[in-house]
Image (cartoon, rainbow, N blue to C red):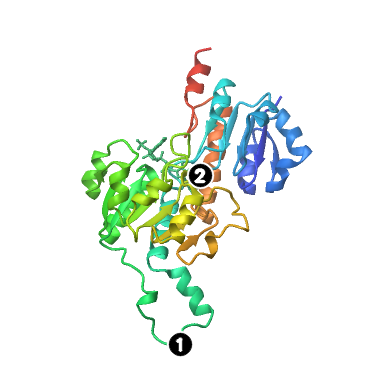
């Protein structure tokens, strides 16, 4: 009997054909399909699940008794109940590396857009306010030569820091990461405590994963430690920042601006003030959202799934201990 895969969103025809050469595939293209009886019926028979943007709960896992492998089309895996997956010996794979540079581009876009007030001023032009040359009330601040503090200094953090150091002559600081002697040498990066980094950085850029240790890492106390004109960039997950505390810090001028790709709740609730604040650039979680990178991420998920269901090691397992356990029985 052929094994079955549930594919939830973001695969193209070529990728579906590739999977269907070996497996029966139930494809659900739309986000709302996750609530349909057909999706749940397919999951009950599935050995593999390829997904993007689906909150996978322990209950969902319980409803999939044959599940062996999940291939997430993302590098972050805060949407998955890792303890439950480990208990059930279900392998989880993600898509690191293929999205690093694109996400770093988005991070730097937020740095530039907030510092130079690009979105605010483009709207100002569109609204017909440009009647004479602008004055200091609409000036931005420099990016080149400033201090860039990276909270998290992994793949994406390092790629943002490279843009800052090599392209803009920025001084790089980092925290919430193990020592990185090679990056210190390459970029002159300095490792500091979170407190020191917040107090000394012109830009604080968050690129840690969301987990129990990082949830609300940037809270009211952390925001108070930032420079008065400091700019906060979040390219990781919304819940790493206490959003209410951030709104207050922006409203009271405690910090200068924020560039946000991610939010506590997504899509952003209509009542959120963030998109309407002049010192905020709010993007709809577009970190990796280019045609090229989303296709590469989906392909990585397909490759991971094909390797894992065939009993080989996938390219990027999140919980490789499952493979070790499987090998020992
Ligand atoms: P990564 O290479 O694993 O880097 C994560 C960094 O965070 C590492 O430097 C790590 O320290 C550090 N870290 C600090 N506290 C940690 C903790 N409690 N647990 C784990 N790591 C901790 O990951 P990445 O590829 O750069 O991706 C980072 C995050 O960005 C993802 O998890 C995802 O949530 C987010 N992301 C967002 C988008 C978007 O569309 N906005 C796109 C892609 C990714 P060490 O160096 O010591 O390991």
Give left or right: position of 178 versus 329.
Answer: left
Please state the total of marks drawn on the protein image: 2
The location of residue 188, given as percent across then percent down, is 22, 49
Q: Give whichever of discs 2 and 1 has the lower sequence position.
A: 1
Q: Which residue lies at the image location 38% right of the left edge and 43% below the top edge? A: 155
The location of residue 278, given as percent across then percent down, is 48, 67
Q: Residue furthest bottom?
A: 131
Cα distance between the residues tagged 2 and 1: 41 Å
Q: Say what secondary structure mark 2 lies in.
A: helix
Q: Which residue lies at the image location 45% right of the left edge and 64% below the top edge? A: 279
Q: Which residue is mark 1?
A: 131
- Mark 1, other Cα within 10 Å: few <14 / some 14–19 / many ≥20: few
Q: Say what secondary structure mark 1 lies in.
A: loop
The location of residue 114, given as percent across then percent down, is 41, 63
- Examine the image and state in which quarter residue 46 appears: top right
Q: Which residue is mark 2?
A: 239
Quadrant hosting ligand 1: top left
267 and 220: which one is in front? 220
Residue 15 in sight in this render: yes
Q: Which residue lies at the image location 31% right of the left edge and 44% below the top edge? A: 195
Task: Judge whether 86 appears above or below 234 on screen.
Answer: above
Q: Which residue lies at the image location 27% right of the left edge and 52% below the top edge? A: 200
Give left or right: position of 175 versus 14.
Answer: left
- Mark 2, other Cα within 10 Å: few <14 / some 14–19 / many ≥20: some
Task: Judge whether 87 appears above or below 143 on screen.
Answer: above
- Examine the image and state in which quarter residue 113 appears: bottom left
Q: Residue furthest right?
A: 37
Report the disc number at residue 272: none
Residue 158 in sight in this render: no
The location of residue 269, given as percent across then percent down, is 62, 54
Mark 2 Cβ and ligand 1 under 8 Å apart: no
């Amino acid at each position: 009997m052929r094994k079955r895969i549930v594919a939830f969103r973001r695969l193209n025809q070529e990728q579906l054909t590739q999977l269907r050469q070996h497996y029966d595939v139930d494809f659900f293209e739309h986000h709302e399909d996750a609530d349909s009886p057909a999706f749940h019926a397919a999951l009950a028979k599935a050995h593999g699940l390829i997904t993007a943007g689906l909150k996978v709960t322990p209950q969902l896992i319980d409803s999939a008794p044959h599940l062996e492998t999940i291939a997430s089309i993302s590098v972050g895996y805060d949407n998955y109940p890792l303890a439950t997956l480990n208990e059930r010996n279900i392998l989880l794979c993600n898509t690191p590396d293929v999205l690093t540079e694109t996400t770093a581009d988005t991070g730097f876009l937020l740095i530039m857009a907030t510092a130079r007030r690009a979105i605010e001023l483009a709207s100002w032009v569109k609204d017909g306010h440009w009647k004479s040359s602008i004055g200091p009330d609409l000036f931005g601040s420099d990016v080149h030569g400033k201090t860039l503090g990276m909270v998290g200094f992994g793949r994406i953090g390092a790629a943002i820091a490279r843009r800052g150091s090599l392209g803009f002559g920025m001084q790089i600081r980092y925290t919430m990461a193990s020592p990185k002697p090679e990056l210190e040498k390459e970029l002159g990066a300095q490792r500091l405590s979170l407190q020191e980094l917040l107090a000394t950085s012109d830009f604080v850029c968050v690129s840690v994963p969301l987990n129990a240790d990082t949830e609300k890492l940037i809270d009211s106390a952390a925001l108070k430690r930032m420079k008065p004109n400091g700019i906060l960039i979040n390219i990781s997950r919304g819940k790493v920042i206490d959003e209410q505390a951030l709104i207050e810090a922006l409203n009271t001028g405690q910090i200068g601006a924020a560039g946000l790709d991610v939010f506590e709740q997504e899509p952003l609730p209509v009542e959120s003030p963030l998109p309407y604040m002049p010192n905020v650039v709010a993007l709809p979680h577009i970190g990796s959202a280019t045609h090229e990178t989303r296709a590469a991420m989906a392909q990585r998920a397909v490759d991971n799934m094909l390797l894992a269901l065939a009993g080989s090691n996938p390219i990027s397992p999140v919980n490789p201990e499952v493979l070790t356990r499987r090998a020992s029985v």
